[in-house]
């Protein structure tokens, strides 16, 4: 059976993203996707290897979309400015694409080489930002892990309604990122990161 004219993986992933962002990642099934695209579910098998394959492709697509947004914002920036922009854009991505963001975390096999390659581009970008602080090798990775934990934690708590006090979340995020930056500076001054 040949693929439907006009239907390609990009269109499928965009439709899956819409479902995930509006109804949640669990709502992304072959049946719901076929219904949205107005096709029969077997037609999807010309582009993805079942639900497992769809989830893998969606995770990679999400990581690529996140990377593209981060790199676009980081161009021409370094140091504190770059970290602030990267942090705010990371959370903005999770806000604008909550289902797709969740898909990046729920890859069927996070050790899959294609998934790892897509994710490693984000890590490499963050490591380059840490290099501006003089952090290399293991120190840079530790700092990137810390930054990712902060940003993911903030995004996840926000998505789940964990911030009930009516204070500006963007101010909270800015303060959190600035605290991270101060921590990196403090660790460097105390010789704890080499």
Image (cartoon, rainbow, N blue to C red):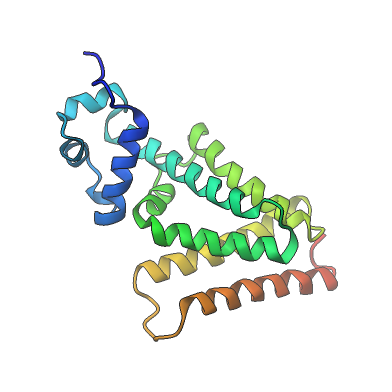
Give 46 or 26, whichever is nearer the viewer.
Answer: 46
Q: Quadrant of the N terminus?
A: top left
111 to the left or right of 59: right
183 to the left or right of 67: right
Residue 1 in view in this figure:
yes
Q: Residue furthest top?
A: 1
Q: Residue 194's spot in the image, x, y percent?
A: 82, 59
Residue in the image at 65% along x and 76% along y = 179
Give 65 or 59, whichever is nearer the viewer.
Answer: 65
Q: Residue 156's spot in the image, x, y percent?
A: 42, 65
Query: How many numbered marks does the figure carry?
Result: 0
Q: Residue 4's spot in the image, x, y percent?
A: 23, 21
Residue 54 in view in this figure:
no
165 to the left or right of 136: left
19 to the left or right of 133: left
Q: Quadrant of residue 193?
A: bottom right
Residue in the image at 48% along x and 45% along y = 65
Give 104 or 18, whichever is nearer the viewer.
Answer: 18
- Residue 49 lies, with reference to residue 52, above or below; the image says above
Residue in the image at 72% along x and 75% along y = 182
Q: Residue 39's spot in the image, x, y percent?
A: 16, 30
- Residue 26 lies, with reference to residue 150, above or below; the image says above
């Amino acid at each position: 059976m040949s693929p439907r004219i006009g239907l390609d993986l990009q269109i499928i992933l965009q439709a899956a993203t819409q479902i995930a962002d509006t109804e949640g990642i669990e709502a992304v099934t072959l049946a719901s996707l076929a219904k949205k695209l107005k096709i029969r579910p077997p037609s999807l098998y010309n582009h993805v290897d079942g639900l497992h394959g769809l989830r893998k492709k969606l995770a990679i697509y999400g990581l690529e979309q996140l990377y593209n947004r981060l790199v676009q914002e980081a161009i021409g920036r370094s140091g504190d400015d770059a970290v602030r922009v990267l942090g705010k854009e990371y959370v903005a991505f999770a806000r604008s694409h909550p289902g797709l963001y969740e898909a990046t975390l729920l890859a069927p096999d996070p050790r899959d080489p294609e998934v790892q390659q897509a994710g490693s581009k984000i890590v490499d970008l963050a490591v380059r930002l840490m290099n501006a602080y003089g952090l290399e090798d293991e120190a840079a990775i530790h700092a990137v892990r810390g930054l990712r934990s902060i940003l993911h934690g903030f995004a996840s708590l926000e998505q789940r309604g964990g911030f009930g006090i009516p204070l500006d979340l963007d101010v909270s995020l800015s303060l959190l990122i600035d605290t991270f930056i101060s921590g990196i500076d403090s660790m460097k001054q105390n010789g704890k990161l080499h």
